[in-house]
Amino acid sequence: MSQAYTPPGIPPGAEPESPPPKSVYLVSYPKIVFLYPTLIAALIAGCYMLLPQNEDHSDSHFVALVFMMVFTVNLIVFAFDFPRTTSLTLFFALAAVVLGLLLLFRFNSQILPALHRIFDAYKPDANATFFFSIAGVLSAIYLAVLINVQFDYWEVTPNELLHHHGILSNLERYASPSLKIDKEINDVFEYMLLRSGRLILHPSSEPRAVVLENVMNINAKEAILTKMLGALQVQVRAAPPASSLDHT
């Protein structure tokens, strides 16, 4: 009975690793992609306001307040970096304290009456049209972003680093052997939202590095690139076969 061939260096019974991909595409997205929680909140709020039991807009203040809370947190993520888990914990702790104080002042008029009057007077109101307008604007911007990235992206192959850009598909080529890759995750929130981070490519033939911001699924991309370039280095450094030495 014939036995299956096992490549050299792989233990018997073990499955050989899949070959590295022929190319990896890298896309740098603008920061507005992190506003998708606001888009989802606007869609949910708009649909909720269209329900028959909300025709009198009895819950409009509450829905608008929840939307404003989501929008505020999303803007904080958009505006500031939270580089470590500690800063993320401090942010949630601070948000919990602020929310607790707001509820305390709102439902206890004897504590700081002036603040109680301000909070009691704050009753945001919005209808379904407003929420769907927010969702529509963000959706249109996201569609424009998706179209734009089709004309500006990077491709890494075992031999070259390619920059595709422009409507006419302009192409810039860089040598990829000895390509150095740095990965940075500067914001815990952004990594939680889209598993994104920064990739810094250092082509050996270029004095300046290529910085790609907000690369989605950065860990998976970095692992594939490492596998591809590692396989290339093994091929380059491999010794010539014995048969070729016998003929010399």
Image (tube, rainbow, N blue to C red):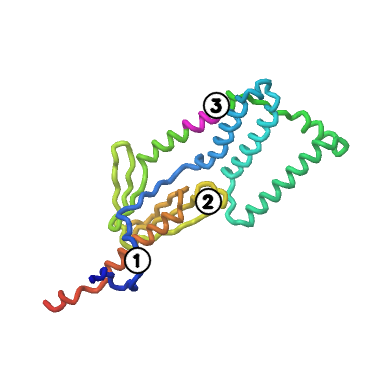
* Mark before the other along the chain sequence, 2 or 1: 1
The part of the chain drawn in magenta is 133-140
Mark 3: amino acid: Ser
Q: 124 above or below 26?
A: above
Residue occupied by mark 3 = 133
Q: Residue furthest top?
A: 56
Q: Quadrant of residue 146?
A: top left
Q: Residue furthest left?
A: 247
Where's residue 38, x and y in %?
57, 36
Label 1 SS = loop
Q: Is residue 138 magenta?
A: yes
Which residue: 20% across, 74% down? 241
Asked if the residue under mark 3 is in contact with the one under mark 2, i.e. CB atoms within 8 Å, the reply is no
Residue occupied by mark 2 = 191
Residue occupied by mark 1 = 15
Label 3 SS = helix
As measured in the structure, the alpha-carbon distance from the residue carrying label 2 to the one carrying label 3 is 28 Å
User: The C terminus is located in which quarter?
Assistant: bottom left
At label 2, counting other C-alpha atoms closer than 10 Å, the crowd grade (few under 14, some 14-19, many 20 or more) is some
As measured in the structure, the alpha-carbon distance from the residue carrying label 2 to the one carrying label 1 is 33 Å
